C-alpha cells in the first residue's frame, strides 16, 4: 500500500498489514463507483483555490487537465484503483503527484477526506436518484401504454387473496403506474433535498481560508451549500438513508407487482403469460416454465431493506466525524447497484406479457357482483346496510353477471369506467422534465 495521507514525515508508526486491511475494508473497491465524482469535485476545488489565489491559473489548469487524464485512464483500464491505495482519495493524490510532482500535493489544500467523501457521495446520490426517477417513469409509460390497450378487459379483483369484485386489466395496470409516478416524485424530492455541497467544510470545523464555496458548489451543479461544517459531517449517513428510503419505496412497489405476476402466471390463475426470455426451466422437471426473473425482482426489495437496517445501525453516533461512517458506503452502493438494473428490466416485461381473457372471464363468478347489486338497491332508496343484508341473503342464487357492463357502470373517478389515464399521463409528462 502507498504511504497513507496521514503519515506526517514518512516515518510515523503505522498499523501492520492485518490492521491496515481492516481499516481500509472495502473502501478502495467501493471507491471505484465514487472516484469519478471525486475527480469532478477535485477539479472544481482546484479552480476554487485559483479564485482565492492559493493556486495560479496555470497550476489550476494543470491539475484539472491531469485529473481529466486520470479519469480517462480509469475508464480505459490503464489505471486501476486497487489495494495499493488506502482509498480513492489517496489514489488521486498519488497519481497527481506522479504526474505533476509537488503540485499534486497542493490539491488537498483547504479540504479533508471528510468533506471530499461527503461531496462525492452527494453527487453519486443525485445521479442515482435521477436514474431512479427516470426508470420509474419509463415503467409508468409502459404500464399506461398497456392500460390504454386493455382498459376494458375484465379480470377479477382481489382482497385478502380472495375474489372480491369484477375489475379490469386497465385498473390493475394503472394502479401500479400511479404508484411508480409517486415513486419518481419521491426520488425528485429526496434528490432536491440533498442537493447541497459540503465541500469546503473540511473536517467539520471550516478552515482559515476564504474558500470559494459558492463558486465550487455552482460548478458542481449543487443548488446550495451545506452551510454549517458540523451539519456537513452529521449529515453523513442521513442523506444516504433518505436516498435508500426513496429507493425502497420503488422496490417495495416492485415487490407487489412481482407478487401479482407470480400469482397470475401460475396454473391456478392462468391470467398472464410472460415472454419466454423472462422465464427459465428446471434441471430435472421437463415440464417446468419458471418465472425466475419475476421472483428475483420480488426479492430485490429485501436487499434494499437490509441496506437501510444496516445503515440505521451504523448511525448511532455523536456529533462530528466518526470512522464508523466508513460502513455507510457498502449498504448504500450495494442497494443502488442491485435495484436500479432490476427496475430497468420491468418496462419491457410489461410490454411483452400477454393476457388470457378467457381464464379471467371464467374467474368472474356471479357472487362478485354482490357489491354492485347492493349499491343499485341503495340507489333505489333502500338504506345501504339493509341492501347489504338483502344481497347477502341471496348470494347463493346470484347468477352470472355481465363483466363488461359492470366495468362501464363503475364511473366513480378513477374506477374501471373512468380510469383517468389522461390525468396519470399528465403527471408523467410533468415529472419527465425533472429528470432530463
Image (tube, grey):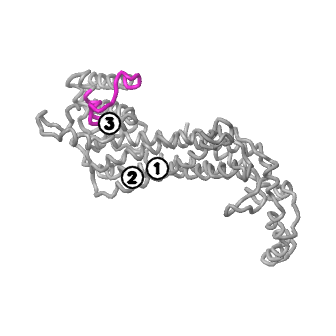
Q: Residues within 10 Å of mark 1 (few under 14, many from 20)?
A: many
Q: Is residue 351 above or below residue 393?
A: above
Query: Circle 3 sits on which residue?
Result: 28
Question: Can you see residue 141?
Answer: no
Q: Is residue 36 above or below residue 342?
A: above
Query: Circle 2 sits on which residue?
Result: 311
**Disc 2 secondary structure class:** helix
Viewer-nearest residue: 256 or 89: 256
Q: Are marks 3 and 1 in contact (CB under 8 Å)?
A: no
**Where residue 159 sits: x, y (%)?**
69, 62
Q: Residues within 10 Å of mark 2 (few under 14, many from 20)?
A: many
Q: Earlier in the sequence, mark 1 or mark 2?
A: 1
Q: Are marks 1 and 2 in contact (CB under 8 Å)?
A: yes
Query: In this image, 298 relative to 170: left or right?
Result: left
Spatial CA span between label 1 and label 2? 9 Å
Q: What residue range appears in magenta?
A: 73-94
Task: Name the quadrant containing residue 354.
Answer: top right
Query: In this image, 157 relative to 106: left or right?
Result: right
Viewer-nearest residue: 140 or 164: 164
**Disc 1 secondary structure class:** helix
Of marks 3 and 1, the one in the foreground: 3
Marker disc for residue 113:
none
Q: Name the residue rendered at 79%, 56% in the picture.
A: 363
Q: Is residue 261 above or below residue 102?
A: below
Marker disc for residue 244:
1
Q: Residues within 10 Å of mark 3 (few under 14, many from 20)?
A: many
Q: Is residue 85 magenta?
A: yes
Spatial CA span between label 3 and label 1? 22 Å
Spatial CA span between label 3 and label 2? 19 Å
Q: Is residue 167 magenta?
A: no
Q: Earlier in the sequence, mark 3 or mark 2?
A: 3
Amino acid at each position: 500500500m502507498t504511504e497513507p495521507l496521514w503519515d506526517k514525515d514518512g516515518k510515523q508508526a503505522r498499523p501492520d498489514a492485518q490492521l491496515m486491511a481492516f481499516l481500509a475494508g472495502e473502501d478502495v473497491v467501493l471507491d471505484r463507483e465514487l472516484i469519478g465524482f471525486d475527480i469532478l469535485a477535485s477539479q472544481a476545488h482546484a479552480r476554487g483555490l485559483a479564485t482565492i489565489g492559493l493556486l495560479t491559473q496555470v497550476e489550476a489548469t494543470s491539475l484539472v487537465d491531469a485529473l481529466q487524464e486520470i479519469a480517462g485512464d480509469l475508464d480505459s483500464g490503464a489505471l486501476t484503483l486497487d489495494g495499493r491505495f488506502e482509498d480513492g482519495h489517496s489514489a488521486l493524490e498519488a497519481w497527481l503527484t506522479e504526474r505533476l510532482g509537488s503540485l499534486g500535493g497542493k490539491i488537498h489544500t483547504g479540504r479533508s477526506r471528510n468533506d471530499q467523501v461527503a461531496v462525492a457521495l452527494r453527487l453519486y446520490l443525485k445521479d442515482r436518484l435521477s436514474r431512479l426517477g427516470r426508470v420509474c417513469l419509463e415503467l409508468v409509460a409502459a404500464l399506461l401504454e398497456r392500460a390504454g390497450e386493455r382498459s376494458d378487459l375484465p379480470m377479477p379483483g382481489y382482497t385478502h387473496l380472495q375474489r372480491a369484485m369484477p375489475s379490469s386489466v386497465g385498473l390493475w395496470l394503472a394502479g401500479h403506474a400511479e404508484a411508480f409516478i409517486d415513486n419518481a416524485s419521491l426520488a425528485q424530492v429526496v434528490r432536491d433535498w440533498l442537493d447541497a455541497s459540503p465541500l469546503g467544510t473540511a473536517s467539520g470545523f471550516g478552515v482559515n481560508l476564504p474558500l470559494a464555496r459558492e463558486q465550487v458548489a455552482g460548478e458542481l451543479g449543487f443548488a446550495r451549500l451545506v452551510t454549517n461544517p458540523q451539519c456537513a459531517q452529521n449529515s453523513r449517513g442521513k442523506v444516504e438513508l433518505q436516498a435508500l428510503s426513496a429507493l425502497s419505496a420503488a422496490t417495495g412497489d416492485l415487490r407487489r407487482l412481482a407478487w401479482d405476476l407470480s400469482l397470475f402466471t401460475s396454473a391456478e390463475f392462468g391470467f398472464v403469460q410472460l415472454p419466454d426470455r423472462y422465464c427459465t426451466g428446471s434441471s430435472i422437471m421437463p415440464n417446468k416454465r419458471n418465472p425466475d426473473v419475476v421472483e428475483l425482482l420480488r426479492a430485490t426489495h429485501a436487499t434494499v431493506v437490509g441496506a437501510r437496517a444496516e445503515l440505521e445501525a451504523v448511525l448511532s453516533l455523536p456529533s462530528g466525524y466518526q470512522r464508523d461512517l466508513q460502513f455507510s458506503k457498502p449498504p448504500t452502493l450495494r442497494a443502488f447497484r442491485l435495484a436500479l438494473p432490476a427496475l430497468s428490466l420491468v418496462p419491457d416485461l410489461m410490454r411483452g406479457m400477454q393476457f388470457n381473457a378467457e381464464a379471467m372471464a371464467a374467474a368472474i363468478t356471479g357472487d362478485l357482483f354482490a357489491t354492485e347489486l347492493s349499491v343499485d338497491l341503495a340507489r333505489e332508496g333502500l338504506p345501504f346496510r339493509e341492501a347489504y343484508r338483502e344481497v347477502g341473503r341471496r348470494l347463493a342464487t346470484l347468477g352470472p353477471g355481465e363483466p363488461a357492463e359492470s366495468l362501464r357502470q363503475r364511473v366513480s373517478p378513477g374506477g374501471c369506467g373512468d380510469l383517468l389515464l389522461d390525468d396519470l399521463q399528465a403527471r408523467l409528462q410533468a415529472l419527465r422534465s425533472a429528470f432530463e
